[in-house]
Amino acid sequence: MKQKPPKERKFGKGVVRCRRCGTQVGVIRKYKLMICRRCINEIGPMLGFKVYS
């Protein structure tokens, strides 16, 4: 049985992707970063954020 491809999203979680790795999970949109939490943890100190364990 054929299936239709998923429709293009215009708004919501399905539209926002991480600029660095492309994932849709855990994207931080504050200050228009558009980077996921995993990438923020890796490159945060270079951006000026402090990483706490």
Image (tube, rainbow, N blue to C red):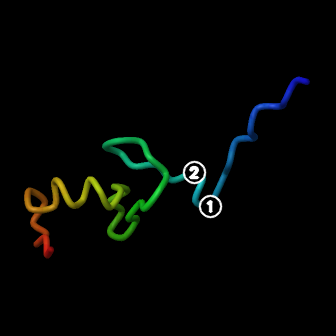
Extreme residue toward the bottom, this view: 52
Give me the residue at 41% from left, 42% from top: 22
**Numbered circle sitting on residue 15:** 2
* Viewer-proximal residue among 44 and 1: 1
Quadrant into which the C terminus falls: bottom left
Seen at 32% across and 68% down, the residue is: 31
User: Is disc 1 surrounded by few (<14), some (14 to 19) or many (20+) residues within 10 Å?
Assistant: few
Could you tell whether 4 is left or right of 20 in the image?
Answer: right
Q: In this view, does 11 lie above or below 8?
A: below
Which disc, if any, is residue 48?
Answer: none
Q: In the displayed structure, does residue 51 sit left or right of residue 18?
A: left
Cα distance, mark 2 to mark 1? 6 Å
Q: Which mark is residue 12?
A: 1
Tell me residue 45's x, y (percent).
Answer: 9, 62
Residue found 32% across the figure and 61% down from its top: 37
**In the displayed structure, does residue 30 sit left or right of residue 15?**
left
Asked if the residues shown at circle 2 and circle 1 are in contact, with their CB atoms under 8 angstroms apart, the answer is yes
Residue 43 quadrant: bottom left
What's the residue type where badge 2 is placed? Val
Residue occupying the far right of the picture: 1
Q: At label 1, which amino acid type do we have?
A: Gly
Question: Residue shown at 70%/41% (left/top)?
Answer: 8
Question: Residue 28: horizontal and vertical position, in percent?
Answer: 38, 64
Q: Where is residue 51? Give x, y as percent.
A: 13, 70
Q: x, y (%) of residue 48?
A: 9, 66
**Residue 8 placement, left or right of 44:** right
Q: Is mark 1 on a helix, strand or loop?
A: loop
Total marks drawn?
Answer: 2
Classify mark 2: helix, strand or loop: loop
Q: Assess disc 2: are there few (<14), some (14-19) or many (≥20) residues with their C-alpha within 10 Å of its C-alpha.
A: few
Give the farthest residue toward the top.
Answer: 2
